[in-house]
Image: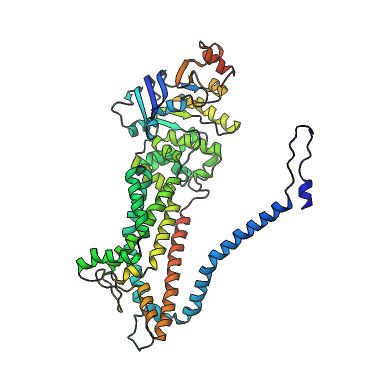
Amino acid sequence: MASRRKGLPEMTTTSTAIVIPPISLWRRIVDRAMTGVAVLTVILVLLPLGAIFAYLIYKGIGSINLAFLTQTPKPVGEPGGGMANAILGSATILAIASLMGVPLGIGAGIYLAEYGRNRYGDIVRFVSDVLNGVPSIVIGIVAYAIVVLRQKHFSALAGGVALAIMMVPTIARTTEQMLLLVPQAIREAAYGLGVSRWRTTLSITLRTATSGVITGVMLAFARVAGETAPLLFTAFGNQFWNWKLDQPTAALSLQIYTYALSPFDDWHRQAWAGSLVLIVLIVGAVSAVRIAVRRGTLAGA
Amino acid sequence: MGVGITVEQLNAYYGKTQALFDINLNVLANHATALIGPSGCGKSTFIRCLNRMHETIPDARVEGKVRIGDLAVYNGTSATQLRRRVGMVFQKPNPFPTMSIYDNVAAGLKLNGFRNRKQLDEIVEKSLHSSALWDEVKDSLHKKSGASLSGGQQQRLCIARALSVQPEVLLMDEPCSALDPISTGKIEDLIFQLKEQYTIVIVTHNMQQAARVAEFTGFFLLGKMIEFDKTEKVFTNPSDKRTEDYVTGRFG
């Protein structure tokens, strides 16, 4: 420590030279303390996630077996059975939601960033932020009103619509932010080559922002993947296999909800196992997309 | 082959601020023309008017006539059509960061619907040869991103990208201001060779550079073109006092 003080260069001109004081002990203490606080907050943020994951493994791993992953639920009182139909159902509903929500959200984000630097854009931004804050159960009711009532029965489609509505504002706003981060110089480079504006937006700007946009999509996906409320009266749940998009469909979150509220110990155990499977699937899906994107990225990009 | 440029009574605005006043200018085909002047004098605005890049800025507008070869720039020509014939190299190298070196050069053609793979390969190689970058990148064309190159290489990549669409005019907006002397030298050599095929308009802060590469030089001050003449004349025997003050380093 003392050497650092000696390490300051000797001033050759004595009269006009400014004297930079050595770094005081107090400043070094504050520096260390602040670094410590930053590290501590990171730990505090990661701790709940680690705790939840650890507890889920502790409670759920024992009930996960081949039957759990391949069979449908057994009637009350019969032990065994599984959540295979709910895993399939969740995947179906999320696929529907992503197919609708991702293009819509990215499209809205493109509008906001590239064309919406005006009052219309401000309105869209405001509406999107409000939509982001609407409770998920309310979005469930909306999907019930516009899909279920019309179809006259619950369906995977209705669940997908509800989740898609929830995905759109998150994707739109992150896409907007990511596109705005792309320097104007990159757009100008494309214009300078005689590339039209829409082509520049799709092939240059959006492509440059890809990794950020995908982060937004994954964020939205992970958020809705565990949603239960909007599925209660849209997908509804189902104890049996269902391959039809217009029929009531099981979902992991619904199954967990039902089982956790039940009075049966066996169902409680299965609810824990279902929760673990849900989290693992979300982490798996997000990681798979990340790895796929990284594969396609060039060195130095 | 390059084509000539005629500018008549060009006025340019940013919102209510007028940036260029009554510019008249004739640029000869297959020559390099340098535009010099202090920061903020309108040189960059001027060349951005030549390929209609000026109007991409919100509230910016242009009045006056510009002809590039047989194209009336502000009358009946679409901006995209025009820009395919008038290439531009920017002050800061701006390669497309997520694209490979190859794709950077091929981008102009690919995005305009050109699909012939074999011809594309040839054009990419030829463009990279023209910008004196081929030997440095030929082994990593598809492996490395354009952003992974050094600053000078990036700028030569951007020149190759501009050349790939085979323009008639090449606009260069201070292409060397972010580069070291060695890269600058390479790009100046390049400008010398490119003159044979293209008409070049180059904005520069570096008066030696203007003297080295350009046959003609225009001096801009506060949005007006004060003097336009043969480079030799502008630097050795300018007719305007303000030009003399600037080129002799008395102000600016």
- Residue A132's place in the image compared with B6, above or below, is below
Looking at the image, which is closer to me, A89 or A149?
A149
Q: Residue at x 48, y 24 (%)?
A: B41
Residue A44 shows in the view: yes
Q: Quadrant of residue A84?
A: bottom left
- Residue A176's place in the image compared with B34, above or below, is below
Question: Picture coordinates of residue A242 (x, y %)?
Answer: 28, 74
Q: Residue at x 34, y 34 (%)?
A: B80
Which residue is situated farthest in the front direction here?
A26
Question: Picture coordinates of residue A11 (x, y %)?
Answer: 78, 37
Q: Residue at x 29, y 63 (%)?
A: A161
Residue A168 shows in the view: no
Looking at the image, which is closer to me, B110 or B22?
B22
Q: How many numbered markers are drawn?
A: 0
Question: What color scheme is it?
Answer: rainbow
Residue B134 in the figure: left or right of residue B180: left
Q: Quadrant of residue B200?
A: top left
- Residue A120's place in the image compared with A61, above or below, is above
Looking at the image, which is closer to me, A118 or B91?
A118
Question: Picture coordinates of residue A144 (x, y %)?
Answer: 26, 67
Question: Picture coordinates of residue B248 (x, y %)?
Answer: 59, 16
Looking at the image, which is closer to me, A153 or A288?
A153
Residue B67 in the figure: left or right of residue A25: left
